[in-house]
Amino acid sequence: MTTKYLFFTGGVVSSVGKGVTAAATGLLLKERGFKVAVQKLDPYINVDPGTMSPYQHGEVFVLDDGAETDLDLGHYERFIDIRLGRVSTFTTGQVYAEVISKERRGDYLGGTIQVIPHITNEIKRRVGLAAKETGAEIVILEIGGTVGDIESQPFLEALRQLRNEVGRENCLFVHVTWLPTIGATGEMKTKPTQHSVAALRSIGISPNFIIARADDPIDESLCDKIALFCDVEKRAVIPMETAGVLYEVPLMLEKRGVGDLVLEKLGLSARQKPNMKPWEKLIAEVRKPKPTIRIALVGKYVELQDAYMSVREAVKHAALANGVEVDLAWVHSADLEKDKGWEVVESADGVIVPGGFGSRGIEGKILAARYAREKKVPYLGLCLGMQVMCVEFARNVLDLEEANSSEFDRGTQHPVIDLMLDQRSITDMGGTMRLGLYPCELQKGTKAAAAYGASHVDERHRHRFEFNNSYRTQFEKKGMTFSGLSPDGKLVEIAELNDHPYMVGSQFHPEFLSRPMKPHPLFVGLIRAAKERARK
């Protein structure tokens, strides 16, 4: 069949749930029997978010093939339960880099390079790759930012051209927009939506759907008004108030008939009846009263919780599997160094130390690892969280007082965490780490092997430094087991303490593969141990 396209644009403000809405729509189409691919078009000029500050961009989500991407790709994978690759995202930076590279090679035969047609052609070429490489029948594209952003204009122009090339019957534009409420009067306003649709229409695009977002219930009269002023069918104006539970969004869209309406407008018929019962069961489970346990997340970027989006979701998935509610307490690791925030850590039933880069707050993370080890508090270290767990062990169990990672102290006498050999000559920062899916062999009789119930797993990585094998024997003699290793035995993937209820650190990022219906085993193990501690 001809590939069909759904283009998601944003209006009024960003961060209104465009990515979640796109992901949930993808789920509805998959449930109706169609093969779906999703693509994120990011207008920033960075090549990828890998070198961007988490404070500006939130977490960097890593795919199987090592692509460093926007956190929305995490939503796509978690909702639709698909594995995406690097064709599922591209940025303005990548587009311009490719066009300039071709110009330098002389591919354009001395012609003047312009936004139209050269930049827009490259955008269309990359959009085409999503269907070509995945075999998808329906491709969902989310355009980052909002209509009116100067950076987004080449993308929108390219999609306008693409609509004419593939046929209007094969494309739908879905505009996700915000309805603000005026505090003084309590009145919800549609005027910003009207203006953003007018801006979209001024470049030749009329939306087929409008997803009207608000924190409060949206009156039907407002939907009538939006339909009238924005020239959209009334049934294609979908009111979406903020969901109490993120995973309720697909059910809300299903209730509004979005899945069937999208297929109707694309000239398709459902191949099977959608089965939303697992999602209904999930939401019922979320809403069921459950005992609460507290998990302290000791991080460097806790002011912006989106920096740990996948960790937060993985904790929720594991909590559901264990029949508990989790009170996730955010602790800034730098505060622990100043003797602040300890009351939160000390009241917790478990501790998570997630990844990060740079020396700020590292000693606070090491202190958290020491507390968890000495007090027998369940602990899960993710990437850097595993490394600080090893540094702490070296300092306080092996009595190597100067032990450190060479990332933070290049002159340390005991670099128990050190730069990988193949990384030592690299000068570029972007896309040069150990990235993507790598195999891990689990050692029999360990907590990691028990958690997974397997002997071999594949996990996603994003790091530059590794455990230094020169210290492996010393660590093992004092009670640390390296329960996950690369197939050749040379790289430590998982470390755990023998004499501890659950102190496990992974060099990889398990949070990237956790799903609502398939929680990640290492998180399930942590929550189970924390639940047991709370019970005692």
Image: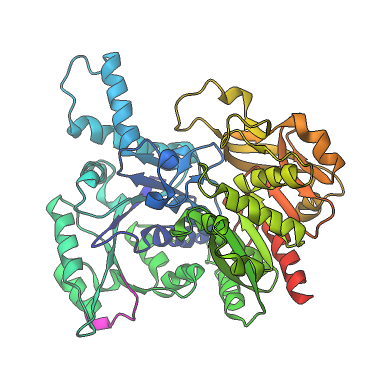
Residue located 24% across and 36% down the image: 120
Residue 366 image position (x, y, % from top left): 64, 50
Residue 186 image position (x, y, % from top left): 24, 84
Residue located 29% across and 43% down the image: 166
Q: Is residue 210 left or right of residue 460?
A: left
Residue placed most toward the observer, 240 or 253: 240
In the displayed structure, would residue 172 be above or below residue 531? above
In the displayed structure, would residue 286 be above or below residue 120? below
Part of the protein shown in magenta: 213-221
Residue placed most toward the observer, 170 or 529: 529
Image quarter in which the C terminus is found: bottom right
Residue placed most toward the observer, 518 or 254: 518
Residue located 38% across and 67% down the image: 258
Residue 30 belongs to magenta span: no
In the displayed structure, would residue 391 be above or below residue 242? above
Residue 28 image position (x, y, % from top left): 47, 62
- Residue 320 lies in quadrant: bottom right
Q: Is residue 15 left or right of residue 327?
A: left
In the displayed structure, would residue 277 be above or below residue 419? below
Which residue is situated farthest in the bottom direction here?
185
> Can residue 34 be seen in this snapshot?
no
Residue 217 belongs to magenta span: yes
Residue 29 image position (x, y, % from top left): 46, 59
Which residue is situated farthest in the left direction here?
202
Q: Is residue 293 left or right of residue 496?
A: left
